[in-house]
Image: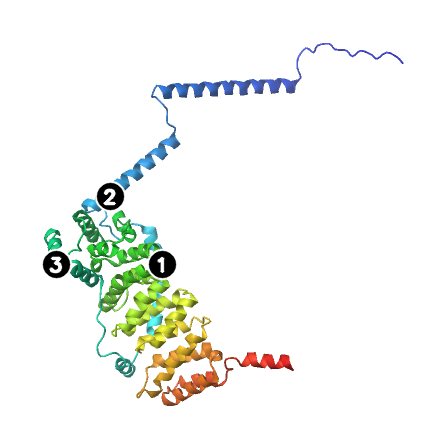
Amino acid sequence: MGKERATDKRAQRHNPLHAEYTKSADATVGRNKQRKKYTEREERRLKTEGQEYVDPKLSKKILAIAREQQDEIHDEEEDADELGGKNDTQAGGDSEEEEELEEYYDEDEAAYDGFAEELELDAGDQAILDRFLPSGPAQRRNLADLIMEKIRQHETAKTIASAPKDADRPLPPSVNPKVIEVYTQVGKLLSRYKSGKLPKAFKIIPSLPNWEEILYLTRPENWTPHAVYQATRIFVSNLKAKQSQKFFTYVLLDHVREDIRETKKLNYHLYMALKKALYKPAAFFKGVLFPLCESGSCTLREAAIVSSVLSKVSVPALHSSAALMRLAEMEYTGPNSLFMRILLDKKYALPFKVIDSIVFHFIRFKSESGPLPVLWHQAFLVFCQRYKQDLTPEQKDALLQVLRCHTHHQITAEIRREIVHSSCRGELIEDGSSMMLD
């Protein structure tokens, strides 16, 4: 084997071009790193000397937090001292929210106008409806009546002597005078509220054990419709169903009926409050719908407005079934038929017990002398259209006998056709079982 040649290892005069560029870049990076270390060291030194530099981003955060704290302090001062002016807000504030609400209102108002036009009655129909009104309407109770009853129960000589005096409005016992003063001022604010933030003192009312007495101090009967809507949102979100029911009965329902009585229509914010109240369906039915029907003074206009709310909001089938059963067993008035028609038109799968109670509701009018209102015939038709296959043969025969006693020149024929040309409850199951046996 020959010897391996030694390679020529002469030193190069200079590095390749790419190596020179890499070296210069590394040198620049090194200088930047040294510069950064120097800057950090200087910042630490200035920090120890109390001369720290604050960058713009941190300055913005600090200013935002400080501004938020100032706003909170200012709100608390307004809650306590009622420095009028700032929260005596006008409709101009929160313009984006107001525009969105107004746009939504236009749609709801148009739908309601069409719904109201369908319920225009002539003198004859109105006379028939008036015939079913109770002679002695039930006495309405509001939040003031409830608190006054509690005051009379707990009132003592010592409490009367120590409690602050109010010429027009007795105050609840065992309430701190400072609390009375604060919530009295909150009530004055709510009496002219239009938009903006609500006082924090008002937002904590649902969490208080004696929230009814505290709410009484704010004079709910003087609230604006805007305040009622905001209060409904707060109470629906923070109260249980039974407590929300009291708020609906003693505050919301009174405002709704009073506004309809005065203006012949319902304020948009009160309409939205009713829709928000339906987020607690059990409380809505027990606090708004049933007291309205049992009052004995519910007008067709009031029923039409509340029914339009029911038609727009989805209600759980269980709550709708319970409401239908209660309405069917209640003493009959014209608005009852309207509420039943709206709930029946939702086409929920109802238990047989509820269907039986509705059948008995219509059968009991067999002995009624005199004509029945058109609303009753309409509810009868909707019931037969939606649930004709859930009726037994005996129930169909009984309903046909009712039709012989009470007729309507346009509706009765449709009801009879729906009952006669339909299968009965259990017929399909029997046919299927017989086919299997064959």
Q: What residue is at 36 percent from the left and 89 percent from the top?
A: 405
Q: What residue is at 26 percent from the left and 56 percent from the top?
A: 227
Q: Position of residue 212 (x, y in %)?
A: 24, 57
Return the residue nearer the eye: 370 or 63. Answer: 370
Screen quadrant of the C terminus = bottom right
Q: Position of residue 37 (x, y in %)?
A: 47, 19
| Residue named by callout 2 | 76
Return the residue nearer the eye: 268 or 378. Answer: 378
Mark 2 or 1, closer to the camera: 2
* Residue at mark 2 to residue at mark 1: CA–CA distance: 33 Å
Can you see residue 405? yes
Give the SS element for disc 2: helix
| Residue named by callout 3 | 168
* Residue at mark 3 to residue at mark 2: CA–CA distance: 28 Å
| Residue named by callout 1 | 103
Instruction: Left or right? Give the position of 111 relative to 7.
Output: left
Instruction: Left or right? Give the position of 263 relative to 375.
Output: left
Mark 3 or 2, closer to the camera: 3
Of callouts 2 and 1, the N-terminal one: 2
* Residue at mark 1 to residue at mark 3: CA–CA distance: 41 Å
Give the SS element for disc 1: helix
